Image (spheres, rainbow, N blue to C red):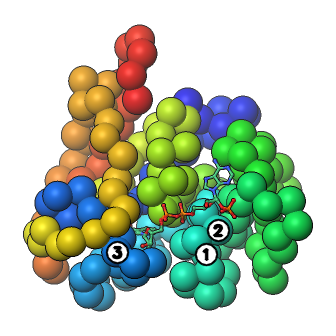
Amino acid sequence: MSTPRGRRVTMVAALAENGVIGAEGNIPWHVPADFQHFKATTSGHVLIVGRTTHEGIGRPLPDRHTIVLTSNRDWRGEGVDVAHDITEALELADRVIDGREEECEVMIGGGSVVYEAALPYADVQVLSEIPVSPEGDTHYPEFDRRRWSEASREPRDGFTVVRWERTFGCGGS
Ligand SMILES: NC(=O)c1ccc[n+]([C@@H]2O[C@H](COP(=O)([O-])OP(=O)(O)OC[C@H]3O[C@@H](n4cnc5c(N)ncnc54)[C@H](OP(=O)(O)O)[C@@H]3O)[C@@H](O)[C@H]2O)c1
């Protein structure tokens, strides 16, 4: 849990009622207010994303320090840092934050392979519940609700933002 230097790790995702987060490389709904929410939640922070998600967006998102996860040692991306496993990504995030003066956190921006890898390190999940059940090929990972408590639930324009915080205890993600 947390980064090696004890910084909070927050997963930010939007998921459908059936757990779907993606279909054929895209997000299978259009909820502009949720994009605004993602932007507001992650701006100013370090954002860790998978190579597939990064290439789907096609550019580094502004006002975020992006770290792209890939197993390909030759992969390079303009305006982003690269890490080859989740612990390397979290160590790199720590170094980026060490070099900053302003408050900054570690955000996990998906997709599902990255959420799965980061879940054991996550302290907080900020999940947008989208009231749809589309076909999809990528899902948010299951997590053990006995190890997490719902800290807040906020209805927004067309979706609900639920904040989960990890509770103390043994085992489970
Ligand atoms: N609804 C949401 O909130 C949300 C958010 C983000 C993305 N999405 C959707 O999710 C889908 C993409 O998700 P995805 O699961 O297919 O792909 P992804 O997690 O974005 O990227 C997977 C790739 O990232 C690299 N990677 C991931 N974990 C790694 C690790 N621990 N170590 C080394 N490399 C790692 C690998 O790249 P290499 O193959 O290069 O080794 C892997 O193939 C898209 O449909 C996207 O639109 C939805």
Of the 4 image quadrants, the one containing the N terminus is: top right
Neighbour tally class for label 3: few under 14, some 14-19, many 20 plus, Cα within 10 Å: some
The residue wearing badge 2 is 51
Say above or below: 60 vs 122: below
Mark toward the start of the polypeptide (1 vs 3): 3
**Mark 1 close to ligand 1, CB under 8 Å:** yes
Determine the CA span between mark 2 and mark 3: 16 Å
Instruction: Using the image as rendered, state which of residue 36 and residue 131 is in the foreground.
Output: 131
**Mark 3 close to ligand 1, CB under 8 Å:** yes
Instruction: Using the image as rendered, state which of residue 72 and residue 28 is in the foreground.
Output: 72
Residue at 65% from the left image edge and 86% from the top image edge: 59
Residues marked 2 and 1 touching at CB (< 8 Å): yes
x, y (%) of residue 80?
Answer: 77, 73
Q: Secondary structure at mark 3?
A: loop
The residue wearing badge 1 is 54
Of the 4 image quadrants, the one containing the C terminus is: top left
Instruction: Using the image as rendered, state which of residue 72 and residue 54 is in the foreground.
Output: 72
Q: Secondary structure at mark 1?
A: helix
Say above or below: 78 vs 42: below
Neighbour tally class for label 1: few under 14, some 14-19, many 20 plus, Cα within 10 Å: many
**Mark 2 close to ligand 1, CB under 8 Å:** yes
The residue wearing badge 3 is 23
x, y (%) of residue 141?
Answer: 36, 46
For the question of whether residue 100 can be seen, the reply is: no
Question: Could you tell me the amino acid type at mark 1?
Answer: His
Residue at 55% from the left image edge and 84% from the top image edge: 57
x, y (%) of residue 6?
Answer: 65, 33
**What number of labels is visible?**
3
